[in-house]
Image (cartoon, rainbow, N blue to C red):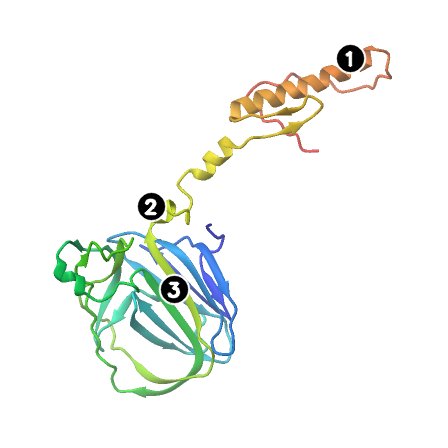
Amino acid sequence: METSNDMLSGDGFSAWISVDGVPCAQYAVQYQEGDAVAGPNARCWIASTANKSFSIHIRKEQDDSDYRAMVYLDGHAVVNSVFHKMVTSTRTISTIWISDYETRNLNFAALDITDDDSCLENPPLRNIGYIRVVMTRGKRGEFLPEGREHDIENLGKVHERLKTGLSHRVKYGPAEQAAVKRTCCQYEVQGKPVTFLFRYRPLDVLQANEIAPRIGSQSEDKANDVTAMVKGEGIINVNSDDEKERELLAQLESVRNRKRAKQNNGLPKKKVKAEANFVPGEVIDLTI
């Protein structure tokens, strides 16, 4: 079920994903309290779109601690960023550093499926389809002259017998020159990790598994709702808006006819304001 919120939150931290700049709807959101070892964690499903770029957004409420965000894409640690305690605005991660001067952007892509049996020995795919963000409070240390270079390879061909319901993966764009040099520093962890897990699949897969609602299902549900009304005439079941309107008008007219009959039978009459007959298509406010 889609939540009204577009982010996961816990212990003062928040995180969410956007595709092509649009925040992803989150489905089947689950929260778990922290324990003696780890802080709270939250997870959800999001819809991925092949050949679309995506970004990870993080935020921390203001307090007296610096903080670190580590990001794992399909099981690989690709981001390890530290932020000053006064940085409470949203931080956006749309690229990964592969050296002090180069970055690669983030995209969703379709799996490259093959029936070549030599690909059966490729690394296991159990971590494909996951974006994990781990945030901790701590303290920044001394700046370092340079960081570690760590380029990451895109996933190769996947044997059709190994994909196990997977359709998409994370794909890294070509290396690009960064606008500024990467800055690195030491970091001392002082708090429990807070974990946000985003499980991504194509929207039609989420819909087929009843994780995400089908497009137009809400309006269809309204049209197919059965309205039961008990007003002396029994229960009236209607399945369409036109029939519903006609039944309501007929029922209302029946009630008025009974009132008029009572008045004509000698019951005390009250002075009432005359009203025009109801016309199909009119908006009738029945609120009391």
Question: Along the horizontal axis of the image, is 244 left or right of 166?
Answer: right
Which mark is in front, 3 or 2? 2
| Residue pointed to by mark 3 | 57
Residue positioned 50% across, 80% down in the render:
64
Q: Residues within 10 Å of mark 2 (few under 14, many from 20)?
A: some
The numbered dot on residue 261 is: 1
Kindly check if marks 3 and 1 are in contact, taking CB atoms under 8 A apart as contact.
no
Which x, y percent locates residue 193?
44, 75
Nearest the eye: 180 or 56: 56
**Marks 2 and 1, how far apart at CA:** 58 Å
In the rendered structure, the answer to whether residue 101 lies left or right of residue 234 reads left
Q: Amino acid at mark 3?
A: His
List x then y, in percent, for residue 227: 58, 30
Cα distance between the residues tagged 3 and 1: 68 Å
Could you say which quadrant of the image residue 108 lies in? Answer: bottom left
Would residue 90 be seen by someone viewing this image from the given angle?
Answer: no
Q: Which residue is mark 2?
A: 204
Q: Are marks 3 and 2 in contact (CB under 8 Å)?
A: no
| Label 2 SS | helix
Q: Residue at x 71, y 23 (%)?
A: 232
**SS of the residue under disc 3:** strand
Q: Is residue 175 left or right of residue 243?
A: left
Mark 3 vs 2, N-terminal side: 3
Image quadrant in which you'd find residue 176: bottom left
Q: Amino acid at mark 2?
A: Asp
Q: Earlier in the sequence, mark 3 or mark 1?
A: 3
Residue 223 in the image: state x and y as whole percent.
49, 31
**Residue type at mark 1?**
Ala
